[in-house]
Image: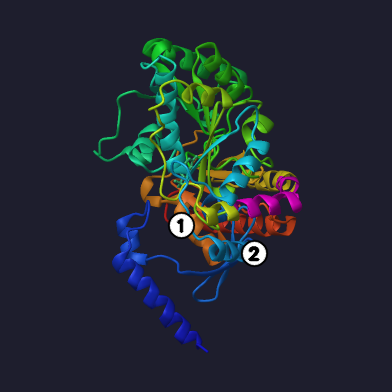
Amino acid sequence: MLTDKGQNDAEAHLRALDQRHTLHPWTHFDSFEREGAMVVESGEGCYLKDANGKSYLDAVGGMWCTNIGLGRKEMAQTIAEQVEKLAYSSTFVDMTNGPSALLAEKLASLTPGDLNRMHFTTGGSTAVDSAYRLVGFYNYCRGKPEKTHIIARDQAYHGSTFVTMSIGNKAADKVTEFQYLRDGIHHISAPHHYRAEGNPSEENFTDQLIAEFEAKIAEIGADKVGAFFAEPIQASGGVLVPPKGYLKRMWEVCQKHDILFLADEVVTAFGRLGHFFASEDEFGVVPDIITTAKGLSSGYLPMGAMIYSDRIHDVISQGDENRWFTSGYTYSGHPVCCAAALKNIEIMEREDLMQNATEVGAYFEEQLNTLNDLEIVGNVRGRKLMMCVENVKDKASKELFPDEVDIGKRIAITAEGLGLLVRPIGHLNVMSPPLTLTRKDVDFLVETLRASIVEVTKQLRAEGHL
Ligand code: PMP
């Protein structure tokens, strides 16, 4: 048995190895050099334990993904059984496997409209990357080869491949000189009501955004625009809930101009908003393509899917016999990942986690909004289990703290000390807990976040920032 000292030594050793050899995603070099990473050892439900034995409520849900919660024996068993039976088989060309076929049929039963066609991928980025190619391929097949341009939004995040980073447009990701793909990719304003210029009403803001979209289509030429890519709620761009009617009207504009509507539901699907898919059930939109990942397997194994309509399939599958869709990955339709996803969905249905997400999500929304009385909380936004607090130096002017204050991170570190993990994104703190969250967890989460913000506010005042 390890002593406390022994445990600390083991933790320090792992942290040092990691620091020496790992390049972490989106991690600032200087702070990583100084502090290293938290070594996580185990997880159960909504809780994580670090290598020192300290427990945390993981309000980040891993990376918006641990939807059914960690440590489920049933998942371990399903995965182990599938590994023993068939650990790998390709789905290229003329092979398939049971879990892949069954998952495809299950997903078709959950998607809106005629979105009955699945292209399995390794995660969200590869789903969006494939979708980008599908848009061009579909239009090529129906004799409109020019219709390849994509319109997406500022502050969007669609993945980390070259193409998907180009389609996204988070200011913080594009500060370096690195050249993204620019030809044929266009950006319009994010539906960020809190920061909209001139404080327009929600209705006026929607009108402005629709007009901007129409103007962008006219500028490019409707005959050249292939698709509009949109996260129903922009996730890592700052949990941007669109103003009322916005998504539906954007969809109508797409239909008018024969433009495909792609809903990037990598985050919003599988219960985060209380539905299997949020596009139709939350926003009244039936997309032509849905990309998804994360909650599809609740993070137990890597898995994504590009889901598209029968209508698109009818076009791409007709005609020239030598034509094929050149997209796919060694692990597309991986039998173990698909078996895990199927079991994950079964658990969601059996435990009615959509209902829990809806009920506890509403309570979370209500309770988190009580933080609005704090001096540095400018805006609490989000829906159900997808929430965010925007911290500001001045509530009236919405002025931000200078970058060096690193306010989101400072609050996150203080909360971590109190046993709560919230994700800092610039001046924001973002939360996406598992769907199994309870009201008691919500109470702890909100109380602890409040205490953390109050503590940081005191420090900032002492340092002269307030
Ligand atoms: N789309 C959205 C909306 C996302 O939030 C993410 C990941 N955060 C991705 C795509 C990329 O998914 P992955 O990291 O699985 O490649």
Q: Is residue 181 left or right of residue 241?
A: left
Residue located 43% across and 76% down the image:
11
Please identify the quarter of the rendering in which residue 444 is found: bottom right
Quick one: SS at disc 2? loop
Q: Mark 1 touching mark 2, by CB under 8 A?
A: no
Task: Tell me if residue 297 can be seen.
Answer: no
- Check residue 356 for magenta coloring: yes
- Check residue 402 for magenta coloring: no
Residue 188, percent from left and from top: 43, 23
Q: Is residue 126 left or right of residue 378?
A: left
Residue 187, percent from left and from top: 40, 25
Badge 1 amino acid: Ala
Q: Is residue 29 left or right of residue 440?
A: left
Q: Vertical placement of 443 versus 242: above or below?
A: below
Q: Which residues are magenta?
A: 341-357
Please identify the quarter of the rendering in which residue 275 is found: top right
Residue located 63% across and 40% down the image:
105
Task: Tell me if residue 57 can be seen.
Answer: yes
- Mark number, residue 462: 1
10 Å neighbourhood of mark 1: few (<14), some, or many (≥20)? Answer: few
Badge 2 amino acid: Arg
Return the residue at label 2: 72
Camera-nearest label, 1 or 2? 2
Q: Earlier in the sequence, mark 1 or mark 2?
A: 2
Q: Vertical placement of 240 versus 12: above or below?
A: above
Q: Vertical placement of 81 versus 464: above or below?
A: below
Residue 328, percent from left and from top: 42, 41
Residue 141, percent from left and from top: 42, 20
